[in-house]
Amino acid sequence: MTGRVLRVGAGQLGPIARDEPRHDVVARLIALLEQAGDRGVELLAFPELALTTFFPRWFTDDVSGHDHYFERSMPSEETKPLFDAATTLGIGFSLGFAELTEDGDRYNSTILVDGDGSTVATFRKVHIPGHQDDEPWRPFQHLERRYFLESDDGFGVWRCFGGLVGMATCNDRRWPETYREMGLQGVELILIGYNTPIHYAPDPGQNSLQGFHNHLCMQAGAYQNGTWVVGVAKGGTEEGVESLAQSAIIAPSGQIVAQALTTGDELIVADCDLDSCRRYKETLFDFARYRRPEVYQRIAGQKGVIEP
Ligand code: ING
């Protein structure tokens, strides 16, 4: 290792039951945090919606029917022990949670907290997959478009942990624009939590490819933008739905340097040399030298396909 090495962890979670109290989940998160402390981790990434079961799999007539899964403040009374433990250990972390704002807006959010306990930023998921209304033909729902707004904040990058850190959430990782938006800000580490059911009702033929697609999009995003990527799952069979685990830490080369072995609560760790990003940012992907935005109008200006 030569440069600015940041020891990063991914705190993968196994299933969270529908009625599992926040207190019990926070205890699981703190257990992972303590394992991370034993291994000298400086920044620990937790999954998307890490405090509760993936509730968009169930339809409620009134959208507020799931509001008990949302946080009205972060930290809250139930999550404060996690923040306190992290500050005591001097470990920064990212935590996915369902955010209910004072205005009554609902977002699929992730908070990034520095090692001294200060909040760096809160990211709100940009690409919201799934559907809006009950579709009884499905074995389970994916109603994120019913319960979460699409964030218009886009993708930020923050100077913290000795480098440039960004965030994305689950479906965001499937869109190349996600990585490039942060790549154009010089990002060196992207933290991505996900909850990904193996079964994809619109095309079950993709089920067997979920693991391949999961790593494909994150490895490509890492390589094409010269950045580290941490993908951290809530996996296992949660309320009867088999969800992808396979958390991974990916180098700017696109190589997977650490990967979860189980589908349960599991810590994986890697020493991320942030200076190694330059091997790609200053050669193949020297954006200032090689990119051609003057011929990319469609990417930013057009939503759907317009055939010739
Ligand atoms: N989950 C899924 C994801 O993008 C999904 C939605 C599932 C898409 C299966 C394709 C196949 O990983 C979330 N929470 O975005």
Image (cartoon, grey):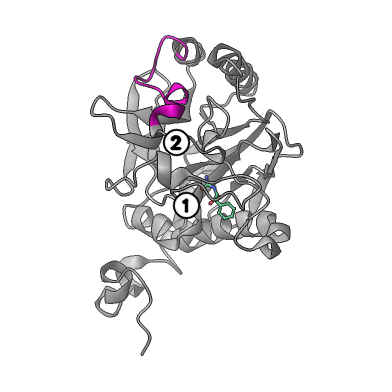
Q: Distance between the residues labelled 1 and 2?
A: 19 Å
Quarter of the rendering containing residue 157: top left
- Whether the magenta-drawn stretch holds residue 116 is answered as no
Tell me which secondary structure the magenta stretch mostly adopts.
loop
Counting from the top left corner in percent of width and height, residue 187 is at 39, 49
Give the residues in magenta.
64-79
Query: Front-most of 97 and 91?
Result: 97
Query: Front-most of 67 and 256?
Result: 67
Q: Identify the residue shown where x is 66% and y is 56%.
A: 210
Counting from the top left corner in percent of width and height, residue 122 is at 34, 33
Kindly identify which residue carries mark 1: 129
Q: Which amino acid does label 2 sit on?
A: Asp
Q: Identify the residue shown where x is 46% and y is 44%.
A: 144
Quarter of the rendering containing residue 301: bottom left
Cβ(mark 2) to ligand 1 < 8 Å? no
Q: Residues within 10 Å of mark 2 (few under 14, many from 20)?
A: few
Split into 4 quadrants, where in the image is the C terminus? bottom left
Q: Identify the residue shown where x is 63% and y is 56%.
A: 201
Helix, strand or loop under label 2: loop
Quarter of the rendering containing residue 40: top right
Instruction: State yes or no: discs 1 and 2 in contact (Cβ < 8 Å).
Output: no
Q: How crowded is mark 1: few (under 14 residues within 10 Å), some or many (20 or more)?
A: some
Kindly identify which residue carries mark 2: 61
Residue sitting farthest toward the right: 261
